Amino acid sequence: MARVDVSRYQTFGDITERLDSIVSQVRDKDVSLERSLDLFDEAIALGSKAVSLVDATDFSPEEEARLAEEPEAEKDASSADASSDAAEGVAQDAPATDGQ
């Protein structure tokens, strides 16, 4: 297998645009199996390039702090939603009273 040259794709935008194009081509019924396999190899190479971009990314201390806070904020929000849902379930399960 020949090594696929993905050096022209330098950003995530470039990579995702090309991957979208690959998906469209592979879905075309007129594309040969051989061409589909070549496109698959290119997609794998693009995925590796994307991983390399992530590994090479240097975040500022502010960005790192914000990224560290996001999962906690999402977890807190989902806990609040679960508590709210549980409270609603209790209220719905409670027997109705006639005011007596």
Image (tube, grey):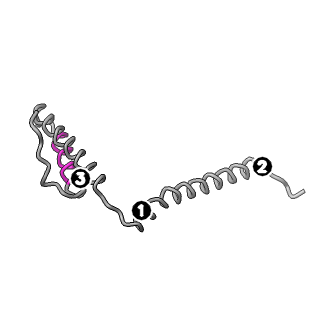
Position of 94 compared to 66: left or right?
right
**Residue in front for this viewpoint, 94 or 55:** 55
Please give the label number shown on residue 9: none
Residue at 40% x, 65% y is 63
Q: What stretch is highlighted in magenta?
A: 15-27
The image shows a total of numbered marks equal to 3
Q: Where is residue 4 drawn, in percent x and y? A: 12, 42
Amino acid residing under circle 1: Glu
**Residue in front for this viewpoint, 82 or 89:** 82
Q: Where is residue 41 drawn, in percent x and y? A: 17, 38
Disc 3 crowd rating (10 Å Cα; few below 14, some 14-19, many 20+) is some
> Nearer the N terminus, badge 3 or badge 2?
3
Residue at 19% x, 40% y is 27
**Rendered view: 37 above or below 45:** above
The CA distance from mark 3 to mark 2 is: 51 Å
Position of 90 compared to 82: left or right?
right
Disc 1 crowd rating (10 Å Cα; few below 14, some 14-19, many 20+) is few
Q: Is the magenta stretch mostly helix, strand or loop?
A: helix
Position of 17 compared to 98: left or right?
left
Please give the label number shown on residue 64: 1
Amino acid residing under circle 2: Ala
> Nearer the N terminus, badge 2 or badge 1?
1
Q: What residue is disc 2 on?
A: 94
Q: What residue is disc 3 on?
A: 16
- Secondary element under disc 3, as helix, strand or loop, is helix
* Pointer 3 with pointer 2, Cβ within 8 A: no
* Pointer 2 with pointer 1, Cβ within 8 A: no
* Pointer 1 with pointer 3, Cβ within 8 A: no
Amino acid residing under circle 3: Thr
Q: In which quarter of the image is the C terminus?
A: bottom right
- Secondary element under disc 2, as helix, strand or loop, is loop
